């Protein structure tokens, strides 16, 4: 709670999560008695610093988050301040209704926060700001008075009417007439010709006047169908100048962004900048017709009209993620908010943008504008240097000059996100000293003790004070990973989190994974943002004083599943799985580790010993005895609720060695099949199936070398090493061979045993040198192992040139078939599928080749997103079972229960298959197994495909699972 999504940091005295208005009143009474400030907070996505405070923070997202009532007849809803906007939209949708404003943070911002900031969003050209959609507000003043705010002076505190009626001329002439004027207090809403609307005037007060406890909001009719026209222009100025001309066509949105923020392959029409113009209609055809009318009226380079909802969501996601992607310049350098949302009259937007670009250049700054072009409101992140005194001085000078520029164009310093600490100091430049004094008089009527969010809007804190970066250490921190995207600097990695809080989303469907533990617990400390903030405080050393030894950080990271979902789903690419491994590495250095780190972190070692001693059948028999299994779980730090997995009586490589003389030889490419720990010891059927399919596709399959080169041998030399001497070349032949197995190091990395991981990975690179020299593809069947080789390997061994070469050679099962057997046609399975895309596949590897392979095989339907909840050792570790089960129940298990009879259950990850078996009584299959079974069926073998749905919870041979 020390930070929001801004550049600022203030340390609160404490956090209170009120359950109702009575709790709010009690908290206010205590704080008033002790003179402690109070800050109301929703999703904490404010960009100007107004959701941070030094006193007590009231967190409304924990309990006061209900939709109290929804009345379709009156088109109103009664909401509590902590209700997330998407929850209201979901409830209103069956009635054909919606709340008009929709910021890009709609999946996690709250109605209370929207009212506090007077939020807008992309549809404000059609439905206005939050203030335009408010009927009544229930408010508690700092002195405990309950007010019901509305039009006709309803709920006005004593003296407010007299204040307004004594300043009618100033209220009529001193406030710019803009669709996006958010700066300052909306005192002009108290004019008699505007209905003397106290509720409207309260909107945008940023928690400085009173504490909202309930709101009556108006809903609008949602168009039954929508179309999205994406209009391409040569540059952003051309797009900006065209935006105002589209408003007479009554679009729902007119959003703009330039090529700087668009990822490659986004599917946009030709151009250097684009307008996203949405239209509505009673039917898809009507919406499309209106969109095509706008295309004809616009002078564009190119255009695209999309009516399919999923395709529209994909395009909108590009725009919505800009708040995060804009925090990195094209060269990877950091960019920050601070001047995120100035607004000018829409007709002046093109001229303003040209002047804005010139001002940036004059201060040697860079930024990429985007935003609500139809309303003249521009978002931008700028590459301020907020780490040095010179950079902070430039930040202030630029801020002052930009405020003057905005005012010169008749604009507002804030057009959506409020003034907070970022802009309130500059309000006299916009309104003049007399109007700002009027704001102070109004504040004194509402909050005479200055208890509520002091330092915001009136008597503001300096815009260059309380900067959140000032507390970070001046020198880089010694770390194990390379952090290549952050210049090797762990401080910069932690700074990646800018607080947009997409990790707090609980309603998003589709392939997204982040953040499963927050979805399960609802606790901020279990979100990616919460953990990043704790790491920030750990580095700062003020609140968390024991650094890497911190128990607070350890406990917050304990429920991180290391799913890597944030690496992709977070708009700025925070990689909490890596940060967790880094932290555990330092936290347990020279200290006793938890039992699970030994039992599961060193799993490859134990399983290899079992294979060598051929004791798997004995251990399986002992694990079937409940008292012995319970004792083993206690000793190994394993959750008592879990069943111990059965070990394969014969390993995959054991099967391979026996098969080797008789295996078929194709004429296709030679590929190296990686025998990961899970395939080798726990599910060798996956490896056997993969060999069956790869050879059917005409590929030649081999396994990695197991003979480890001796030190000094040519194969152990690095590319830059000198040629070996004759003697050193002969020594290996005179010594007995050393045998070893390749390993991706995943279990060591996930438990923070990074020194051991490095040793294992260097040994793996030594083994794989012949493969690397030959340039062979390496097929990895287990997604988590493939992801570890693609990312953890080069980032952990950033000093070894072989590491990126092996990472580049790694292919998934579907990728190797697509690239090396492109003419092969898979067998026709022709059945629907259910299951879940593996977290690491989603986050690191990508699943497009898998989708194409499934489609070619006639496997129809989509796999769910989310996380299975087992996540390697996580779900097995003692104390994690309930969260693990909650993660599975969020999306995976419901999708299996709802699957139709005959559905094939797919799960490429061993963890996912284990979770499905233990919690859902379903035997899932790797895609290789499904295709191999289809090949055997076509060759005359019995059908062994696993199905779900009615009667489908059975093993391959038809035996019901326990």
Image (spheres, grey):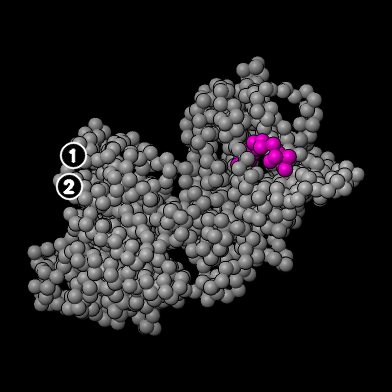
**Residue 347 image-quadrant placement:** bottom left
Secondary structure beneath dot 1 equals helix
Marks 2/1: CA–CA distance:
9 Å
Q: Secondary structure at mark 2?
A: helix
Question: Is 210 drawn above or below residue 774 in the view shown?
Answer: below
Q: Quadrant of the C terminus?
A: top right
Report the front residue among 195 and 570: 570
Judging by the rendered image, the residue that carries numbered circle 1 is 297
Magenta segment range? 768-785
The answer to whether 237 is drawn above or below residue 538 in the figure is above
The total number of labels drawn is: 2
Instruction: Say which of 319 and 159 sits in front.
Output: 319
- Label 2 crowd (10 A; few <14 / some 14-19 / many >=20): some
Occupied quadrant, residue 911: top right
Residue 432: x %, y % from top left: 19, 75
Q: Residue at x 80, y 41 (%)?
A: 707
Can residue 326 be seen?
A: yes
Residue 309 percent across, percent down from the top left: 34, 38
Residue 425 falls inside the magenta stretch: no
Give percent across and percent down for residue 83: 35, 57
- Residue that sits furthest to the right in the current view: 734
Q: Residue at x 22, y 35 (%)?
A: 292
- Name which residue lies at 68% across and 57% down: 754
* Nearer-N-terminus badge (2/1): 2
**As drawn, is 17 to the left or to the right of 70?**
right
> Are circles 2 and 1 on residues that touch, CB within 8 Å?
yes
Residue that mark 2 sits on: 245
- Number of the label disc, if any, that sits on residue 523: none
In the figure, 295 relative to 204: above or below?
above
In this image, 16 relative to 551: left or right?
left
């Amino acid at each position: 709670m020390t930070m929001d999504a801004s550049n600022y940091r203030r340390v609160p005295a404490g956090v209170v999560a009120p359950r109702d208005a009575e709790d709010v009143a009690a908290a206010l009474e205590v704080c008033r008695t002790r003179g402690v400030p109070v800050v109301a907070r929703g999703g904490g996505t404010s960009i100007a610093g107004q959701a941070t405070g030094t006193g007590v923070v009231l967190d409304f997202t924990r309990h006061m988050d209900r939709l109290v009532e929804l009345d379709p007849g009156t088109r109103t809803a009664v909401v509590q301040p902590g209700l997330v906007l998407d929850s209201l939209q979901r409830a209103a949708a069956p009635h054909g209704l919606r709340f008009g404003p929709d910021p890009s943070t709609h999946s996690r911002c709250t109605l209370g926060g929207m009212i506090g900031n007077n939020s807008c969003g992309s549809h404000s050209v059609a439905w206005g700001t939050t203030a335009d959609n408010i009927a009544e507000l229930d408010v508690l003043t700092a002195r405990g008075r309950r007010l019901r705010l509305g039009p006709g002076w309803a709920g006005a505190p004593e003296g407010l009417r007299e204040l307004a009626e004594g300043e009618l001329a100033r209220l009529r002439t001193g406030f710019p007439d803009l669709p996006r004027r958010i700066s300052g207090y909306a005192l002009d809403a108290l004019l008699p010709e505007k209905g003397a609307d106290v509720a409207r005037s309260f909107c945008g007060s940023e928690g400085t006047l009173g504490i909202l406890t309930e709101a009556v909001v108006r809903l609008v009719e949602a168009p039954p169908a929508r179309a999205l026209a994406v209009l391409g222009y040569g540059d952003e100025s051309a797009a900006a100048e065209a935006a105002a001309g589209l408003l007479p066509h009554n679009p729902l949105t007119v959003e703009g962004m330039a090529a700087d923020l668009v990822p490659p392959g986004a599917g946009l029409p030709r151009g250097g900048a684009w307008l996203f113009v949405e239209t509505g209609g009673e039917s898809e055809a009507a919406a499309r017709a209106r969109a095509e009318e706008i295309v004809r009226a616009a002078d564009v380079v190119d255009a695209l009209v999309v009516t399919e909802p999923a395709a529209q969501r994909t395009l909108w996601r590009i725009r919505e993620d800009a708040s995060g992607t804009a925090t990195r310049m094209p060269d990877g350098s950091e960019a920050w908010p601070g001047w995120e949302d100035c607004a000018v009259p829409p007709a002046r937007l093109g001229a303003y943008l040209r002047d804005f670009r010139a001002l940036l250049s004059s201060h040697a700054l860079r930024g990429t504008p985007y935003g609500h072009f139809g309303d003249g409101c521009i978002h931008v992140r700028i590459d301020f240097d907020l780490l040095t005194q010179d950079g902070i001085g430039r930040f202030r000078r630029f801020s002052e000059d930009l405020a003057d520029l905005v005012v010169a164009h008749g604009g507002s310093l804030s057009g959506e996100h409020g003034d907070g600490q970022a802009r309130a100091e500059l309000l006299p430049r916009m309104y003049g000293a007399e109007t700002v004094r009027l704001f102070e008089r109004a504040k004194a009527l509402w909050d005479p003790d200055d208890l509520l969010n002091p330092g915001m809007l009136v008597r503001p804190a300096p815009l260059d004070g309380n900067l959140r970066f000032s507390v970070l250490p001046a020198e880089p921190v010694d770390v194990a990973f390379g952090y290549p995207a952050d210049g090797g600097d762990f401080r910069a990695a932690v700074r990646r989190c800018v607080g947009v809080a997409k990790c707090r989303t609980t309603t998003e469907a589709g392939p997204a994974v982040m953040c499963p533990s927050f979805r399960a617990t609802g606790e901020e400390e279990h979100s990616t943002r919460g953990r990043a903030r704790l790491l920030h405080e750990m580095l700062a050393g003020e609140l968390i004083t024991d650094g890497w030894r911190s128990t607070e950080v350890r406990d917050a990271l304990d429920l991180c599943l290391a799913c890597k979902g944030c690496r992709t789903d977070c708009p700025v690419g925070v990689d909490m799985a890596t940060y967790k491994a880094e932290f555990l590495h330092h936290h347990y250095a020279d200290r006793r580790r938890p039992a699970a780190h030994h039992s599961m972190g060193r799993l490859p070692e134990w399983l290899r010993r079992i294979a060598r001693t051929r004791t798997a059948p004995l251990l399986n028999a002992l694990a079937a005895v409940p008292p012995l299994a319970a004792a083993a779980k206690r000793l190994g730090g394993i959750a008592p609720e879990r069943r111990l997995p059965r070990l394969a009586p014969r390993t995959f490589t054991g099967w391979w060695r026996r098969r080797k003389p008789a295996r078929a030889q194709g004429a296709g490419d030679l590929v190296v099949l990686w025998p990961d720990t899970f395939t080798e010891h726990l599910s060798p059927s996956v490896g056997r199936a993969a060999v069956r399919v790869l050879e059917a596709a005409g590929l030649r399959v081999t396994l990695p070398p197991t003979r480890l080169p001796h030190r000094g041998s040519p194969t152990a030399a690095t590319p830059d090493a000198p040629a070996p001497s004759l003697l050193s070349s002969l020594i290996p032949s005179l010594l007995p061979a050393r045998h070893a197995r390749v390993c991706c190091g995943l279990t060591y990395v996930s438990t923070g045993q990074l020194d051991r991981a490095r040793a294992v990975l260097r040994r793996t690179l030594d083994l794989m040198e012949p493969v690397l020299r030959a340039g062979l593809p390496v097929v990895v069947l287990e997604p988590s192992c493939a992801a570890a080789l693609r990312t953890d390997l080069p980032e952990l061994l950033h000093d070894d040139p072989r590491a990126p070469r092996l990472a580049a050679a790694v292919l998934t099962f579907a990728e190797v078939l697509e690239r090396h057997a492109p003419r092969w046609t898979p067998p026709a399975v022709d059945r629907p599928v259910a299951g879940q895309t593996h977290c690491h596949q989603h986050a690191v590897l990508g699943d497009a080749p898998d989708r194409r392979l499934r489609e070619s095989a006639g496997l129809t339907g989509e796999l769910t997103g989310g996380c299975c909840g087992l996540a390697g050792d996580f779900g097995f570790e003692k104390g994690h079972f309930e969260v693990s089960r909650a993660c599975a129940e969020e999306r995976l298990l419901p999708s299996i229960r709802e699957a139709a009879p005959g559905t094939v259950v797919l799960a490429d990850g061993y963890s996912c298959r284990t979770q499905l078996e233990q919690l859902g009584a379903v035997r899932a299959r790797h895609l290789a197994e499904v295709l191999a079974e289809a090949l055997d069926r076509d060759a005359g073998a019995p059908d062994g495909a696993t199905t779900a749905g009615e009667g489908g919870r059975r093993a391959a041979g038809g035996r019901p699972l326990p």
